[in-house]
Amino acid sequence: MIPISKPFIGEAEKEAVLAVLESGMLAQGPRTAAFEERFAEVCGVEHAIATSSGTTALHLALLANGIGPGDEVITTPFTFIASANSVLFVGAKPVFIDIEEETFNMDVGLIEEAITPRTKAILPVHLYGCMCDMDSIEAIAERHELKIIEDACQAVGATHKGRLAGSIGTGTFSLYATKNVMSGEGGMITTGDRDLAQQCRMMRNHGMQRRYYHDMLGYNFRMTDLHAAIGLAQMAKLDAFTQRRRENAAYLSERITSVITPKVPEGFEHVWHQYTVRITDGRDRDTAIKRLADAGIGTGVFYPVPVHMQGYMRELVGDVSLPVSERLAKEVFSLPVHPQLSKADLEKIVDEVNKL
């Protein structure tokens, strides 16, 4: 079976973990600090704050930007549930707008009509590794004095007109095992604001600046040095991994003809966390996925149910109609694009997909 994703664990990662174990410093320590420094460099920002997951990174980013009970945050329904859950964690309400068919990202033309006196932030999700139209989002945020929280969990290294994901608003990243850079589990917040960075550092560690002196309500959202050691080793491979993903995506797009392949708008550099196609013309997606599985090709559906249609979310936000999101959720499935694919793997994927 050609898997939909395949985390790469090499000798560098193994040696880094063993070094931490031998050091006896397992919790948040020097490896975490080194990982943060390197991540900040890669994202072109002054500060990076490591957390225990992408979800906790989102949670802290919202809190540090003053988002709380009674506030509204405009976001997308076409994403992993953590994007919206994090808004609920701080007592705010997610307000969903529909998406663009071409990029799967939020339709920026719908943002301003969703703004109310309670709107405090825009939370764009750079889905599958392609950034949102951040120039337009930034202009809207400035006009209406709104915060921007970038959910860049799938988009480390992606750019829009030369600007890096996570460098425009308060950036948040996931380091889950299947991500382009992973630490097994973990997250990262990026920012150029020193005060906001310090607030995030305190909140992730029970509100402490110095041990046992608690200046604010905080959480245990720390990263361990074991996870940081893996992530730091992975950072050395990021450029090569990204280049391979782009080459694999280009190979698939040039040759697949039986389904709608993803398009990258001018001015965007995709990092291909997922290579997501659409099956249309009345063909059944489940049947297609089964045929590919029978042929030894793994797939994934990200995501089959838009967030606004999830049971508990519908109770909170009401009966919202977002037709593009609802239609695409029935059409999309992702094919393997990860760096460990061989030429034979790519040929087989193209051959079997074109038989659909």
Image (cartoon, rainbow, N blue to C red):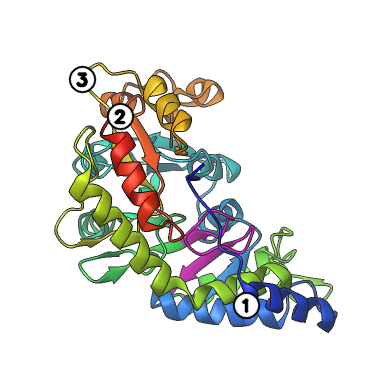
Q: Position of residue 62 (x, y in %)?
A: 51, 54
Q: Residue at x 42, y 77 (%)?
A: 42
Determine whether 273 is above or below 93 in the image.
below
Residue 328: numbered disc? 2
Q: Position of residue 18 (x, y in %)?
A: 77, 76
Give the residue number, with chain letter if any, for mark 3.
Answer: 281
Secondary structure mostly seen in the magenta stretch: loop
User: Which class describes the residues within 10 Å of circle 3: few (<14), some (14-19), or many (20+)?
Assistant: few
Question: Residue type at mark 2?
Answer: Leu
Q: Residue at the spot x=20%, y=53% of the render?
A: 264
Magenta residue span: 172-191
Amino acid type for the residue under numbered disc 1: Ala
Position of the C terminus by quadrant: top left
Q: Is residue 336 visible?
A: yes
Task: State the CA–CA distance, disc 1 to disc 2.
Answer: 40 Å
Whichever of callouts 3 and 2 sits on the residue coming sooner in the sequence is: 3
SS of the residue under disc 3: loop
Q: Position of residue 260 (x, y in %)?
A: 22, 36
CA gap, disc 3 to disc 2? 13 Å
Name the foreground residue: 232 vs 281: 281
Q: Residues within 10 Å of mark 1 (few under 14, many from 20)?
A: some
Residue designated by label 1:
12
